[in-house]
Amino acid sequence: MKSAIHLRILCLLITTVALASAGCSSDRPLPGSVPVSGLVTLDGKPLADGRVQFAPAGPGQPAIGMISAGRFTMRTNVTAPGVLKGPYKVSIVSDQPIGDVPLNSLGLPDKIPEAVSNIPKRYNSIDTSGFTVDVTGPIRDLTFELKSAE
């Protein structure tokens, strides 16, 4: 269990660093990128919050979209909207807030609580989500329909 938590934290940190270092600080898209946005539902209802993550299926640039009331808009880095064209594997994550974590005398947590997922964990990984997308141009209505049971 601990290794799964550490792996999720490591993946999130790697994604954050990759997105933060991917470009400059403007709201202009990266050259060659196109807008991608859409909807995530769970059992037919918009997913309250979370994130959609695109991992290139080959060489390329990862992208992330924060989910709010089911809607998301993909970004290639923290400030640049859009996604570079190409095939992607997709993961979707939606966790309950962890809340306050007690800190030790060094200001660090002694124990990192395990995140509790709002969706089935199979969607949290590009290897098990079952979702892929081939970005060949702008996409404004990309929909990911998640199911609680299958």
Image (tube, grey):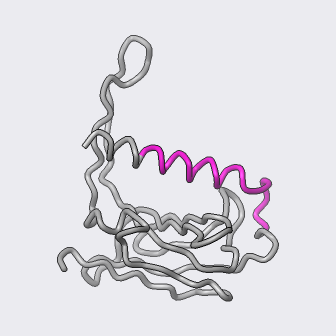
Residue displayed at 35% across by 77% down? 46
Classify residue 121 by image quadrant: bottom left
Outermost left residue:
149
Q: Nearer the viewer, residue 143 or 14?
A: 14
SS assignment for the magenta stretch, majority: helix
Left or right side of 72 for 103: left
Residue 21 within the magenta-colored segment of the rendering = yes
Residue 3 within the magenta-colored segment of the rendering = no
Left or right side of 109 for 16: right
The number of numbered discs placed on residues in the rendered structure image is 0
Residue 35 percent coordinates (x, y): 66, 79
Outermost front residue:
58
Left or right side of 104 for 23: right
In this view, 99 is above or below 94: above
Residue 136 percent coordinates (x, y): 66, 88
Q: The magenta stretch spans which residues?
A: 9-28
Q: Nearer the viewer, residue 141 or 85?
A: 85
